[in-house]
Image (cartoon, rainbow, N blue to C red):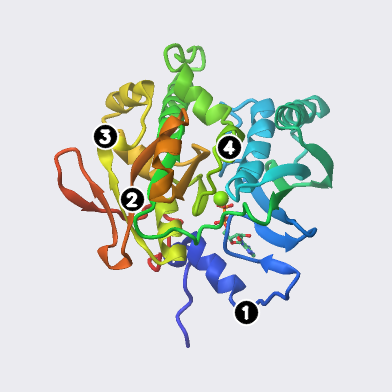
Amino acid sequence: MEKQRTLDEVGEFGLIDILTKNFNTTKSTIKGIGDDCAVLEYSADEYQLVTTDFLLEGIHFDLVYTPLKHIGYKAVVAGISDIYAMNGTPKQIMVSIAVSAKFSVNALEQLYDGIRTACQNYKIELIGGDTSASMTGLAINITAMGTVGKDKITYRSGAKVTDLICVSGDLGGAYAGLQVLQREKAVYNQNKDSQPKLAGYEYVLQRILKPEARFDIVEKLKENNIIPTSMIDITDGLSSELFHICFDSGVGCKIYEERVPINEETGTVCAEFNLEPIIPALHGGEDYELLFTVPLSAYEAIKKIKDVAVIGNVVEKEKGLGMISRSGDFIHIKAQGWNTSEKR
Ligand code: ADP
Ligand code: MG
């Protein structure tokens, strides 16, 4: 008998491949499974983008240190970030929730306060969803829809050798913030009279509790007439996202450690936890920044965009994925974490 594989052995991406390999799409589906969004025929000059995400209590959020309002806000950000990653504009969301009896109406109103605030900030509309009882905790599913000009759409698969590799904002902050929250939770569990020490950690806490999707970057690229050759949002860490772009584009990459943007406070917090800041930047998650590639000819234009760093360039596939460390060593980038299968 064939040996039963465990979820741990195949990882998240391996599992998706196994489950979805025998499905085909026809011509009104331009892109089905495999990118940040599905891409559907919409009008003469635009595509429709659709994406869906789960947020589960105990897996994606911990109610001990996350206010429900923030969970609502972040759920929307996670959904629409995938639309921006296709160079698109989000328009509508649908929200489905499963709730256990422990939640009061007031608590769920707070969740929807966060959802409403995000809808206002990102100018999108809530158009429906579903509500169910749950045996255990809270589950939230967000489906986001948007559009993109056919001439502007950006997949994970278009990176070309010599392209510049760019990152928005800074990385590793959300992971650093999570370390602080988990430490304070452990202290609180020891002594219920203790007050959490959160002063001085404002930036990293904001990164984990109230991330923003980078519509401003998508806008700036448009203003400067730059269409990235590939793009993905950074939800699982830089290394994992570089893997997706390189694998799907059939290329390799060379990035430079010293150019990977890391906020000063993130650096300080990492030192407190005895962590090299590059580790959470590569392997932490939930930064919701954008990783994209642009042709070399766009260098002057890219340089002018505030909050975008050029961290390296696309190389031939045979050269693999590498990072030049601060001391000049070549380090092979490996996508870490349980949710990355060997194949990628
Ligand atoms: P992201 O991190 O950008 O949300 P995922 O890694 O979750 O992307 O998904 C990658 C691709 O696989 C997407 O096209 C997504 O729609 C598809 N996918 C993920 N899970 C499933 C599933 N259970 N069934 C079908 N398609 C899936
Ligand atoms: Mg994505």
Residue under label 2, please give it: 313
Residue under label 1, please give it: 22
Label 1 vs 4, first from the N-terminus: 1
Q: Determine whether the residue tagged by mark 4 lies in a helix, strand or loop.
A: loop
Label 1 vs 2, first from the N-terminus: 1
Marks 3 and 1, Cα distance to the nearest angstrom?
42 Å
- Asked whether 139 or 209 is in front, the reply is 209
Marks 3 and 4, Cα distance to the nearest angstrom?
25 Å
Marks 1 and 4, Cα distance to the nearest angstrom?
33 Å
Q: Residue at x 45, y 64 (%)?
A: 249
Residue under label 4, please give it: 61
Marks 2 and 3, Cα distance to the nearest angstrom?
23 Å
Residue 109 screen position, x and y as percent: 80, 27
Viewer-nearest of labels 2 and 3?
Answer: 2
Q: Quadrant of residue 276?
A: top left
Label 4 CB, ligand 1: below 8 Å? no
Residue under label 3, please give it: 276
Amino acid type, label 2: Asn
Q: Determine whether the residue tagged by mark 3 lies in a helix, strand or loop.
A: loop
